[in-house]
Amino acid sequence: MEYDNNTIPLHTTAANGGQVEDTPMVYRVAGFWIRFLAFAIDLLVIAALSSILWDSLLASPSRPGFLNEILHSNSLFLGLTGSVYLIIMTRLWQQTLGKMIVGIKVVQRNGEPLSWSTVVFRELIARSLSHLMGLNLGYLVCWFNAEKRCAHDFLSDTWVVHDKIGDNSNYISLPACK
């Protein structure tokens, strides 16, 4: 893989027996603040879903602490509702409601659709490491690299990119899906 001056991967097309390979998809990477806004929206959606689902099912005022920690968000984990929400939305649509609202999505390096294993690893294990004890240090990594990837993006080999093409800065090039 080649890189231009802005560390954007470049893929060359070659002619094979008169056929030209698929041209790569070009995306503009999403920066920290747009991702932060999308995640804040998602946290509101997760809180509302958790409240509707679990508070109505477990209406007892004296809920067990452990069960409450598993079902709801905490400093290490977005809870059962949050995890299921992130996995299903990201796998089926490449984006959550927050990402849909701000116009960004998740893509894989090879240009293929996101696989279940990639999404489950990204949203459960890699995102938990990004949250690390409530400090969210894995998200700050986005500020310090040209590809605007958070720790969970590096671990799962994904990027968060804009749906629509804008200006000519911060683009990545991925192979086209076959």
Image (spheres, rainbow, N blue to C red):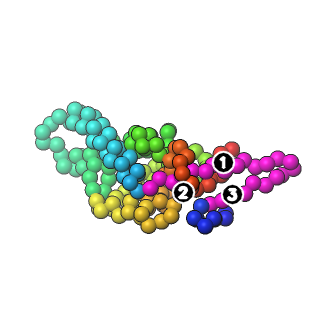
Q: Which residues are magenta?
A: 9-31
> Which secondary structure lies at badge 1?
loop
Query: Amino acid type of disc 3?
Result: His
Residue 153 in magenta stretch: no
Q: Residue at x 32, y 53 (%)?
A: 77
Q: Earlier in the sequence, mark 2 or mark 1?
A: 2
> Which secondary structure lies at badge 3?
loop
Extreme residue toward the left, this view: 61
Of marks 3 and 2, the one in the foreground: 2
Task: Classify the position of the C terminus by image quarter.
Answer: top right
| Residue 51 screen position, x and y as percent | 24, 37
Q: Earlier in the sequence, mark 3 or mark 2?
A: 3
Q: Is residue 161 visible?
A: yes
Above or below, 169 against 99 in this view is below
Between the C-alphas of marks 3 and 2, the distance is: 18 Å
Say left or right for 157 vs 176. Answer: left
Task: Classify the position of the N terminus by image quarter.
Answer: bottom right
Residue with the mark numbered 3 = 11
Between the C-alphas of marks 3 and 1, the distance is: 10 Å
Q: Residue at x 37, y 57 (%)?
A: 128
| Residue 12 screen position, x and y as percent | 72, 57
Extreme residue toward the front, this view: 167
Residue with the mark numbered 2 = 169
Q: Residue at x 61, y 67 (%)?
A: 5
- Mark carried by residue 94: none
Of marks 2 and 1, the one in the foreground: 2
- Mark carried by residue 176: 1
